[in-house]
Image (spheres, rainbow, N blue to C red):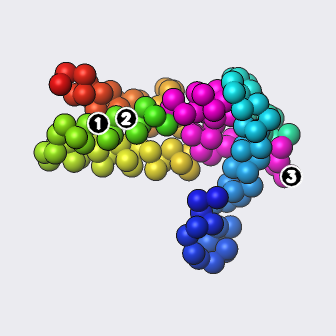
């Protein structure tokens, strides 16, 4: 996985990732089991737990993997594309101070999504902020 490319002691993985790697491996196995349309909405700890050796706990702790498990490769790639398209195309249009701030916040939101279950589709504060950031980027792209 990506984290294995970064050199460092394995104790850092155990301390800071709190078992997430095992859950992420189980989530990848769940995606492999139903790759096209995914498992659909449901109890994710139960779905992913069937592929895990230990307890999954409260969730997957990665919103991108969560979307891949629930919507399959098609939905997951669409979700990733939404961020890539918004950030890259907006960067081509504007390079002022305001855009730099919005891009920094959006990239921060994406990094947050790598380690939490919050996605842009939800009612939490983080979800609303992410949706507003992406909406702001897309509004400038469409207006231009």
Q: Are marks 2 and 1 in contact (CB under 8 Å)?
A: yes
Q: Quadrant of the C terminus?
A: top left
The answer to whether the residue labelled 2 contacts the one labelled 3, judged by CB atoms less than 8 Å apart, is no
Cα separation between marks 2 and 1: 6 Å
Which one is in front, 80 or 11?
A: 80
Q: Secondary structure at mark 2?
A: helix
> On residue 44, which mark appears?
none
Relative vertical location of residue 85 with respect to residue 55 in this rendering, above or below: above
- SS of the residue at dot 1? helix
Of labels 3 and 1, earlier in sequence is: 3
| Residue at numbered disc 3 | 53
Residue at the extreme left of the image, as rendered: 96
Query: Helix, strand, or loop for circle 3?
Result: loop
Which of the two discs, 3 and 1, sits closer to the camera? 1
Residue 93 within the segment the image draws in magenta: no
Confirm whether the magenta stretch covers residue 75. yes
Residue visible at 69% across and 57% down? 21
Report the front residue among 97 and 55: 97
Label 3, label 1: how many angstroms apart (C-alpha)?
41 Å
Q: What range of the chain is rendered magenta?
A: 51-79
Residue 89 has which mark?
1
Give the tally of numbered discs. 3
Q: Tell me the CA gap for discs 2 and 3.
A: 36 Å
- Identify residue for label 2: 85
Residue 31 sits above or below residue 14 on the image: above
């Amino acid at each position: 996985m990506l984290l294995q490319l970064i050199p460092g002691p394995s104790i850092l993985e155990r301390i800071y990732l709190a078992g997430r790697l095992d859950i992420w491996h189980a989530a990848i196995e769940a995606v492999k089991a139903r790759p096209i349309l995914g498992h659909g909405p449901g109890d994710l700890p139960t779905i992913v737990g069937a592929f895990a050796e230990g307890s999954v706990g409260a969730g997957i702790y990665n919103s991108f993997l969560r979307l891949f498990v629930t919507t399959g490769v098609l939905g997951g790639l669409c979700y990733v594309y939404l961020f890539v398209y918004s950030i890259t195309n907006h960067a081509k249009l504007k390079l002022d101070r305001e855009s730099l701030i919005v891009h920094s916040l959006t990239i921060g939101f994406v990094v947050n999504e790598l380690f939490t279950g919050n996605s842009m589709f939800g009612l939490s504060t983080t979800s609303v902020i992410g949706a507003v950031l992406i909406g702001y980027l897309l509004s400038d792209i469409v207006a231009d």
